[in-house]
Image: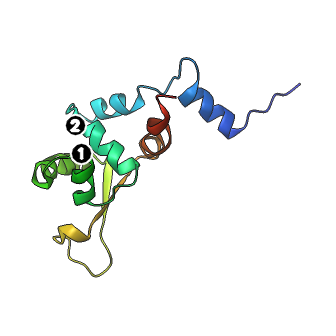
Amino acid sequence: MEIKVSAIDWAAGLFFGLAPYLDPEPSRALRDEGISDPDVISVLEAIGRGAAKASEIACRLRAARANLSRLLQRLLDASVRNREIPFGTSRRAAKKGHYTIQDPALRFWFRVCSPHRTR
């Protein structure tokens, strides 16, 4: 007798079970990349919850936009996040860039799991 488990049930067990295996995944992935700044999780949570521009991220974190530039660059260098620029715009046009989380597991974690951890 074969028991079929749906992808939703499988993900629920990995991320939301009694002892979820992937609960410490964001901190583990960032540690593997050599990023240990505690503000990184806050920045990634803001991006995962919909903040796409540097000004939106700074507003949600109640921080100065200039203070986030070094942190955002470290995330870009570690291939944790992307900066998408509209076609025809120069790479130096900072106000036109939109930030997304590049890694699919981290993107899922910060978009779906992180907002519901307290439940």
- Counting other residues with Cα less than 10 Å from the Cα at mark 1, is it few (<14), some (14-19), or many (20 or more)? some
Please indicate whether residue 61 sits to the left or right of residue 101 in the image.
left
Q: Is residue 79 above or below residue 97?
A: above
Image quadrant where one finds the N terminus: top right
Please indicate whether residue 117 sits to the left or right of residue 13 in the image.
left
Q: Which amino acid does label 1 sit on?
A: Leu
Quarter where residue 65 is shown: bottom left
What distance separates the C-alpha of mark 2 from that of mark 1?
A: 9 Å
Q: In this view, does 92 lie above or below 66?
A: below
Which residue is outermost to the bottom?
Answer: 88
Residue at image point 43% right, 46% down: 107
Q: Are marks 2 and 1 in contact (CB under 8 Å)?
A: yes
Quarter where residue 91 is shown: bottom left
Q: Tell me the SS state at disc 1.
A: helix
Residue wearing tag 2: 39
Tag nearer the camera, 2 or 1: 1
Q: How many marks?
A: 2
Residue at image point 22% right, 37% down: 39
Q: What residue type is labelled 2?
A: Asp
Which residue is outermost to the top?
Answer: 19
- Counting other residues with Cα less than 10 Å from the Cα at mark 2, is it few (<14), some (14-19), or many (20 or more)? few
Residue 51 in the image: x percent, y percent?
A: 34, 55
Query: As rendered, which of 32 and 55 lies closer to the eye?
Result: 55
- The dot on residue 26 is none
Residue at image point 25% right, 78% down: 89
Q: Tell me the SS state at disc 2.
A: helix
Q: Which of marks 2 and 1 is nearer the N terminus?
A: 2
Residue wearing tag 1: 61
Residue 70 in the image: x percent, y percent?
A: 13, 48
Residue 59 in the image: x percent, y percent?
A: 23, 53
Residue at image point 18% right, 51% down: 73
Query: As rendered, which of 85 and 114 lies closer to the eye?
Result: 114
